[in-house]
């Protein structure tokens, strides 16, 4: 019987069985950033251990870098301390660091793929829960804790339980104005924020076949929001095309051999899955979250749920808590909620294609009065190409602030933060209470185009109407 | 670094109500600008406990009756969100060494177990029983018996679940896997040698 990609990659990297039944799994590629690695290097020092495979760890700095000041020392001494600590740890241990002066710095999940470090059939770990992003290439990519970062540094392995595999087939063509972000918000809405616990998600179907690598990354990125630690797409020509010629991609004859090997990792047609879910792409709507978990999403035409709609007491409690925090009334339309801030960026939607798509539509529009709109490239490479294409000018002309690469307002570790109970239309991946830096700040997750529509109208809007999408059928 | 086996955890408990308590709530990201985990205990549940102006909210975690608690009782999907170990580290450093919840997010569960923070699952009804017992008697001693799958409150108990692998690791004192991983070095390099991308 055939095997899934997950099983093949797992088997190729399984070192041995541990006493407690877990597997010692080789981690081929280790990515680190400034927030979750310094303590791990400290633990290594305490135990007089060295980095075992320094050429397989790659570092970048993303969470704490300010996106509106580039000269060090940064105004925040804590941020300065963290970047210096990473610099020192990388230098002391011979680890490659894509520092801010390399032109290659950026959000770790954007840097890995664009440098060609992320490759099919590999195992990847990073002390960051959105590591599943790299699964878009047919890698098995895990988010890990800092003690496990220590384990990878010291042994290039971690102790892990094997996961089950759920195949999620999305078939058909997405309606105009519906994007990869809507697909993943829809999946999480359907399967819940805990639905993926214990599973790796294999995303497949004709919709995924037709997706670009950047679209696949957007979906894999949010696997963890659905409770799945791992999410992946089988590698195909689109994958190889993307990787060809990247700095760390194999070259010459090694390239051909690599492609052959990569192909062999794809799930066999006759393999079985622990679960299969089928989704019709034509039914997916532009999706917006109204609550405080990524599973609390609805189509733009829908109304916010009421407390009494929820079937169980615990769900009623969740809806009540979310409505209170968001200051929304159950039963009211999601459309028309006035926003204060619009944020386009993050490892979910901070890639070139996101910016190209937004630029296409915001041209000729202006950010509404009273709205702060910021647009933040996910990496210096993205920033450079976008600027070469003149996209920055289009955004600035429309009233957006064009920033330097980093995590920015996705989370509260740099100067970009919500203030008070501001409501933010955001292309990021988390809408938890306080996520964007103010303990009462409110986040609504949506696609970059929907954020752009909210920015120019000042309220949650249907981008298809705002930007006059052709043949949207509405 | 084989540690002392953890068969039981005994202590007073505090109830933190709510499902989907995410890692941002356990430790807000703005307190993660640090290069060691020392001192993180101070910021555990900061925004749950404090108002924006830094005053104490009316919450069990601020209630002097529960000041000595070393066990957290909470809802479903505890620890969802980020993979940051800052969350279990702040729990541990604030003096808690066990969490009783309806379910746990996977990465949080793994991170906690590696640190010897015991995470056990109890049903909604059973957690309610414990929560009301400690509400009436905050000084009540709670014992999580990892070996026996029981949570004792006073002289009564409710059943609990814990993942088999985690239970074995706690009972044998092998919950920090580093030593065992280090022992496998030769096999690791053998596996690495079969993978073209691992070559320098
Ligand atoms: S962009 Fe957001 S989700 Fe992605 S790594 Fe940065 S903080 Fe995490």
Image: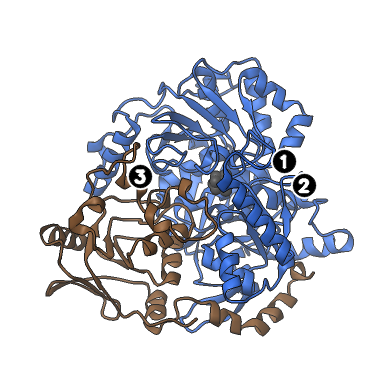
Chain colours: A blue, B brown
- Residue situated in front as seen by the camera: A299 or B119: B119
10 Å crowding of disc 2: few (<14), some (14-19), many (20+): few
User: Marks 1 and 2: in contact by CB < 8 Å?
Assistant: yes
- Disc number lying in front (1 or 3): 3
First in sequence: mark 2 or mark 1?
2
- Residue situated in front as seen by the camera: A296 or A150: A150
Q: Chain of mark 2?
A: A
Disc number placed over residue A102 in the picture, else none = 2
Gap between marks 2 and 1 measured at Cα = 9 Å
Can you tell which quarter of the image residue A365 is in?
top right
Residue A93 position in % (x across, y down):
71, 66
Disc number placed over residue A380 in the picture, else none = 1
Q: Chain of mark 1?
A: A
Q: Which residue is mark 3?
A: B47
What element does badge 1 sit on? Answer: helix
Q: Residue at x 57, y 42 (%)?
A: A76
Whether discs 1 and 3 lie on one chain: the answer is no
Q: Is residue B178 above or below residue A122?
A: below
Residue A86 position in % (x across, y down):
65, 56
Disc number placed over residue A142 in the picture, else none = none
Residue A100 position in % (x across, y down):
71, 45
Along the horizontal axis of the image, is B143 left or right of B93?
left
Q: Where is the N terminus of chain A found, in terms of image quarters?
A: bottom right
Along the horizontal axis of the image, is A398 left or right of B39?
right
Q: Residue at x 65, y 32 (%)?
A: A403
């Amino acid at each position: 019987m055939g095997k899934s990609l997950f099983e093949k990659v797992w088997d190729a990297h399984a070192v041995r069985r541990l006493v407690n039944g877990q597997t010692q799994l080789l981690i081929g590629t280790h990515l680190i950033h400034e927030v979750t690695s310094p303590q791990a290097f400290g633990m290594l020092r305490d135990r007089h251990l060295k980095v075992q495979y320094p050429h397989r760890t790659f570092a970048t700095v993303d969470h704490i870098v300010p996106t509106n000041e580039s000269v060090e020392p940064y105004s925040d001494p804590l941020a300065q301390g963290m970047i210096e600590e990473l610099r020192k740890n990388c230098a002391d241990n011979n680890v490659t660091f894509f520092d801010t002066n390399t032109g290659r710095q950026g959000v770790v999940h954007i840097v890995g793929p664009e440098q060609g470090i992320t490759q099919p059939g590999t195992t990847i770990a990073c002390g960051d829960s959105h590591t599943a992003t790299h699964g878009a290439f047919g890698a098995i990519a895990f988010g890990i804790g800092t003690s496990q970062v220590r384990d990878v540094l010291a042994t290039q392995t971690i102790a892990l339980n094997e996961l089950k595999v759920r195949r999620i087939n999305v078939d058909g063509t997405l309606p105009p104005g519906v994007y990869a972000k809507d697909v993943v918000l829809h999946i999480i809405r359907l399967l819940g924020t805990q639905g993926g616990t214990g599973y790796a998600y294999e995303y497949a179907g004709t919709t995924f076949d037709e997706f670009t690598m950047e679209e696949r990354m957007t979906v894999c990125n949010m696997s963890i929001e659905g409770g799945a630690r791992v999410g992946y797409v089988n590698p195909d020509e689109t994958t190889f095309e993307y990787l060809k010629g990247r700095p760390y991609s194999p070259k010459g004859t090694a390239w051909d051999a690599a492609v052959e090997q990569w192909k062999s990792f794809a799930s066999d047609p006759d393999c079985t899955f622990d679960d299969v879910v089928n989704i019709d792409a034509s039914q997916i709507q532009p999706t917006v979250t109204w609550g405080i978990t990524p599973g609390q999403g609805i189509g733009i035409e829908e109304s916010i749920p009421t407390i009494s709609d929820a079937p169980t007491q615990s769900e009623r409690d969740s809806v009540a808590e979310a409505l209170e925090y968001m200051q929304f009334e159950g039963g009211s339309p999601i459309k028309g909620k006035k926003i204060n801030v619009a944020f386009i960026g993050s490892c979910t939607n901070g890639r070139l294609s996101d910016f190209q798509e937004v630029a296409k539509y915001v041209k000729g529009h202006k950010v509404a009065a009273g709205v702060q709109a910021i647009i933040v490239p996910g990496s210096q490479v993205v920033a450079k190409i976008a600027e070469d294409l003149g996209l920055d000018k289009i955004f600035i002309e429309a009233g957006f602030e064009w920033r330097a690469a980093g995590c920015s307002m996705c989370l509260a570790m740099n100067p970009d933060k919500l203030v008070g109970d501001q409501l933010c239309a955001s292309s990021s991946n988390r809408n938890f209470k306080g996520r964007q830096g103010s303990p009462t700040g409110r986040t609504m997750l949506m696609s970059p185009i929907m954020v752009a529509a909210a920015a120019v109208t000042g309220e949650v809007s249907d981008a298809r109407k705002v930007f006059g999408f052709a043949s949207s059928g509405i | 670094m084989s540690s002392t086996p953890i068969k039981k955890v005994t202590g007073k408990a505090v109830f933190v109500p709510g499902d989907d308590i995410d890692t941002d709530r356990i430790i807000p990201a703005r307190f993660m600008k640090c290069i060691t985990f020392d001192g993180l205990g101070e910021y555990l549940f900061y925004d749950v406990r404090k108002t924006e102006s830094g005053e104490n909210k009316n919450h069990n975690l601020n209630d002097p009756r529960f000041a000595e608690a070393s066990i957290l009782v909470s809802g479903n999907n505890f620890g969802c969100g980020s993979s940051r170990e800052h969350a279990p580290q702040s729990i541990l450093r604030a003096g808690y060494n066990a969490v009783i919840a309806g379910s746990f997010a996977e990465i949080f569960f793994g991170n906690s177990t590696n640190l010897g923070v015991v995470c056990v699952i109890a049903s909604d009804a059973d957690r309610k029983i414990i929560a009301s017992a400690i509400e009436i008697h905050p000084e009540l001693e709670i014992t999580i018996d990892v070996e026996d799958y029981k949570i004792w409150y006073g002289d009564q108990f409710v059943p609990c679940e814990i993942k088999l692998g985690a239970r074995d690791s706690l009972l044998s004192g092998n919950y920090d896997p580093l030593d065992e991983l280090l022992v496998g070095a030769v096999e690791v390099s053998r596996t690495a040698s079969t993978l073209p991308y691992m070559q320098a």
